[in-house]
Structure formats: C-alpha cells, structure tokens
Amino acid sequence: MSFPLLAAGASRGLVTHLQQRFAAATGTALAPVFAAAGAVRDQVVAGAPGEVVILTAALLEELAARGLVARPILPIGLTRTGIAVPEGRAAPDIATGDALRAALLAADGVYVPDPQISTAGIHFMGVLRGLGIEAAVAPRLRPFPTGAAAMRALAGAPEAGAIGCTQITEIVDTPGLAVVGPLPEPHGLATVYACAIRAGAAQPEAARALVAFLTGAETASLRDAEGFERPE
C-alpha cells in the first residue's frame, strides 16, 4: 500500500531516513512529494493527493483555518536559515551583518531556493534588500526550485567563490557541503516546521502512525542530526 505525503523541502532528509522504518512498522510505503513551502500549500489547496502535510507551522495554521488539514498541528522542529559552501573551500565570515554583506558581495555565485515561493528564498531576498545589495548580487544569483536543488548545484559549483543560502536542514542533507552558520541577527530566520493530517484522510491510521514517527521521542535524535532544533 502506498501512502502519499506532501512535504516542504526542509523535511526531505528526515523523511528519507524514516521511510524504511515506517514501512517496516506499518507495511505502508511512503510516497513523498517535496516542494517549496508555497508550492506545497498550493498543492493542498488544489486537492493534490497527500494524507499528511509537512509545512511551516504558520502555513499549516492557515490551511487548518480553511478546513483543509485537521488539528492538532504538531511541531517537528525548528530550523534556521544558514549559509553553506562546498566542502574544502574557505568559509567566509558571516558573524555580523556587515560581514555577511561583504561575503555576499565577494561571492561569484550565490545559490538559493526559489525567491518567490520558498521560505528561505523569500527571506534571503529580504536580507539582500535590507543590506542594500539586491541589485549588486542579482547578476550572480543562482535560483533553483527548491533548497535541495540549490544545494546540490552548490556542491558542484564551478565558481571558486560560490556560497549558498537555505534552511540548515537542507544543507546538512546535501553531500559535499559545509555549514558556515546561521544568518546573523537581525537577519536570521528560525522556522518551525510541523505536520498535520489532511482533512478527510483516507488512511487515518497510517497518517497517525506517520505523525508519531515524525514527532515522537524515539526519533528525536534523528531530528537533531538532520538539523532540526527542539522548539521551546
């Protein structure tokens, strides 16, 4: 039996590592579809198949208010938006806003997820505007549909001074990358991701089992390893 799951890209690593365990415990094979957060929201609204939805807590609240997902909305964890570089390359100083500004201006390729519908991409464009360098960085911006796609491209980037920005969970999940660190304040973004069962789910027992896998104590160490912090 197949179990459709709609999930924001920030959860890809966690879901991938849970697939085999979930199938062994339930006899149900996950069929996840990953996309930028805004695209997942739009898929839910359009009625795309998905028994469980993983999104930012804020977007799930919006969908619950429209009767499209059921409560409770349960937190998976918090992830920060951070900077990455290919392994083996020098990590820039990003400790302050001024340092981050200098690092972005010095980069000859800046890899990011979709700047219109992804959580990290939208935020990053706001950071560029806040630093006053949107126009200067634009020619070197390398946007991709998701953070995972952007980070895979960054790992093999031809530019000697390439850097990238997305959710730290997506950086951690990409071979060949190193996490430089989270964006410095006041430019940081900490996003709580959560899960909810689709309203009128056809496989409610499997849905409840998956939510327990995603949020339960027995998988807390895996969430830690995948870059999710525990919400206070």
Image (cartoon, rainbow, N blue to C red):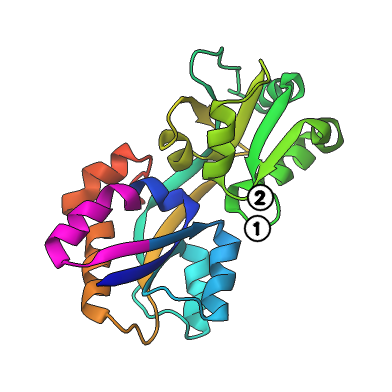
* Closest to the observer, 193 or 12: 12
Residue 92, compared with residue 166, is above or below; it is: above
Residue 49, compared with residue 224, is above or below; it is: below
Which residue occupies 15% across, 66% down?
Answer: 26
Looking at the image, can residue 184 be seen?
Answer: no
Residue 150 lies, in percent from the top left, at 59, 39
Q: Residues within 10 Å of mark 2 (few under 14, many from 20)?
A: many
Query: Of the numbered discs in the image, which one, if any, rests on residue 114?
Result: 2
* Stretch of the chain drawn in magenta: 15-31
Query: CA–CA distance between discs 1 and 2?
Result: 6 Å
Determine contact: label 1, label 2, CB under 8 Å.
Answer: yes
Looking at the image, can residue 190 be seen?
Answer: yes
Which residue occupies 61% across, 54% down?
Answer: 118
180 inside magenta stretch:
no
Which residue occupies 47% across, 41% down?
Answer: 170
* Quadrant of residue 159 within the rendered picture: top right
Q: Secondary structure under badge 2?
A: loop
Q: Secondary structure under badge 1?
A: loop
| 68 horizontally vs 197: left or right | right
| 94 horizontally vs 209: left or right | right
| 53 horizontally vs 140: left or right | left
What is the three-letter code of the residue carrying label 1?
Ile
Query: Of the numbered discs in the image, which one, if any, rests on residue 117?
Result: 1
Q: Main secondary structure of the magenta part?
A: helix
19 inside magenta stretch:
yes
* Closest to the observer, 159 or 122: 159
Residue 15 lies, in percent from the top left, at 33, 53
